[in-house]
Image: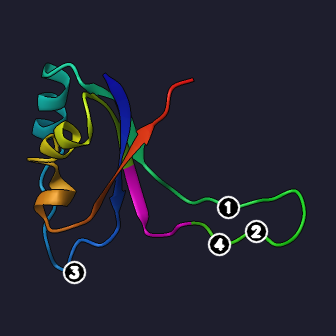
């Protein structure tokens, strides 16, 4: 099993209602794959020298899950309120070691 981040983009079509997160998170927890998550608030980018780029303002939140592979992580999107509302989810593997 590997750890993955599900990065929710802020691109749900305007006027689209986002479902309650409770049932989706409960399903991930009961499957034993939920490792945490949160909405993402304000932020800054910094670098040691020079000008840092602006923050990635299109990200609205993340979930950390455990999954066998990308295919299983993608299947776990069923019921995700952002995904179901037509928004984008970026799946990223967290390398070990």
Closest to the camera, between mark 3 and mark 4, is 4
Whether 57 is among the magenta residues is yes
Residue position marked by numbered label 1 in the rendering: 44
x and y percentages locating residue 3 in the rendered image: 38, 30
Q: Which mark is residue 52?
A: 2
Rate crowding at label 1 as few (under 14), some (14 to 19) or many (20 or more) other CA atoms within 10 Å: few
Q: Earlier in the sequence, mark 3 or mark 1?
A: 3
Helix, strand or loop at mark 2: loop
Residue position marked by numbered label 3 in the rendering: 14
Q: CA distance from mark 1 to mark 4?
A: 7 Å
Mark 3 near mark 4, Cβ–Cβ under 8 Å? no
Note whether 69 is above or below 78 in the view shown: above
Note whether 69 is above or below 14 in the view shown: above
Whether 73 is among the magenta residues is no
Q: Earlier in the sequence, mark 3 or mark 2?
A: 3
Q: Which mark is residue 54?
A: 4
Rate crowding at label 2 as few (under 14), some (14 to 19) or many (20 or more) other CA atoms within 10 Å: few
Q: Which one is nearer the viewer's eye here, 58 or 18?
A: 58
Note whether 79 is above or below 49 in the view shown: above
Q: Earlier in the sequence, mark 2 or mark 1?
A: 1
């Amino acid at each position: 099993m590997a750890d993955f981040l599900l990065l929710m983009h802020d691109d749900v079509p305007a006027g689209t209602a986002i479902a309650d997160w409770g049932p989706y998170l409960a399903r991930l927890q009961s499957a034993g794959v939920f490792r945490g998550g949160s909405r993402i608030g304000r932020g800054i980018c910094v670098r040691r020298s020079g000008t840092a780029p602006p923050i990635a303002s299109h990200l609205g939140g993340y979930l950390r899950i455990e999954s066998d592979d990308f295919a299983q992580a993608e299947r776990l999107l069923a019921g995700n309120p952002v995904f179901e509302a037509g928004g984008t989810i970026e799946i990223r593997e967290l390398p070990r070691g």
